[in-house]
Image (tube, grey):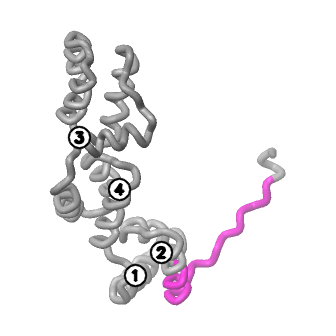
Amino acid sequence: MTRASRRPSKVAEPLDEKQLFSYAVASLGRRPRSVVQLTRLMRMKVEKEETGRLRIASVLEKLKEYGFLDDAAFATNFTRLRQDNQHFGRRRVQQDLLRKGIDPELASETLDAAYEDVDEEALARQHLARKRIKEPASEKESKRVVGQLIRAGFSTGVIFKILKKWDLPEDLLARLEELD
């Protein structure tokens, strides 16, 4: 499709407060969101001036009042899902929470509670099983496993505990530790 054959985009009228509230509720109905995420979405639907910011603030206040928007509950549920379903380590979940606009202090408190009684080595092994990653047979495969576990948010201490239990040669473990 060439640029000339595209239809000109229709400029939408800014939403009033009632329409913005409906839009926000529908958006939260599709997927849980943090305050920051929802604010980003609503910014595209209002004027850029102060009136748009005030309208967003008013809608956010109503959503919080009705219990539709709660960053603490969002962080708790998000953490539980990432931990239980994807078997991610603490670091990965923390990065994801911060990316979603959760306050660093709230994220830290949530993670402390969620990972308090978690055996990270067992969680890392569950992650490897979920990804169908087997014991590495070569240095290249070992590097791939290390990279996979780092991206999944596990500490190097946990990663090397797993590698040592796989009885990899000491010289290979030493080379892998140098990569860290």
- For image coordinates 34% across by 83% down, the residue present is 64
Dot 4 alpha-carbon crowd within 10 angstroms: few under 14, some 14 to 19, many 20 or more: few
Asked whether residue 54 appears in the rendered view, the answer is no
Specify which label sits upstream in the sequence, 1 or 4: 1
Indicate the quadrant containing the C terminus: top left, top right, bottom left or bottom right: top left
Secondary element type, mark 2: helix
The image quarter containing residue 6 is: bottom right
**Label 4 sits on residue:** 84
Could you give the CA–CA distance between mark 2 and mark 4, rounded to whole angstroms?
A: 22 Å
Binning the other alpha carbons within 10 Å of mark 2 as few (below 14), some (14 to 19) or many (20 upward) gives some
Q: Position of residue 28 (x, y in %)?
A: 47, 74
Q: State whether residue 120 appears in this view.
A: yes
* 92 sits left or right of 22 in the view: left
Q: Which residue is mark 2?
A: 28
Amino acid type of the residue that numbered disc 2 sits on in the rendered structure: Leu
Q: Residue at x 37, y 89 (%)?
A: 66
Secondary element at tag 3: helix
The reply, left or right, for residue 150 in relation to residue 106 is: right
Let me know if residue 157 is in the magenta part: no
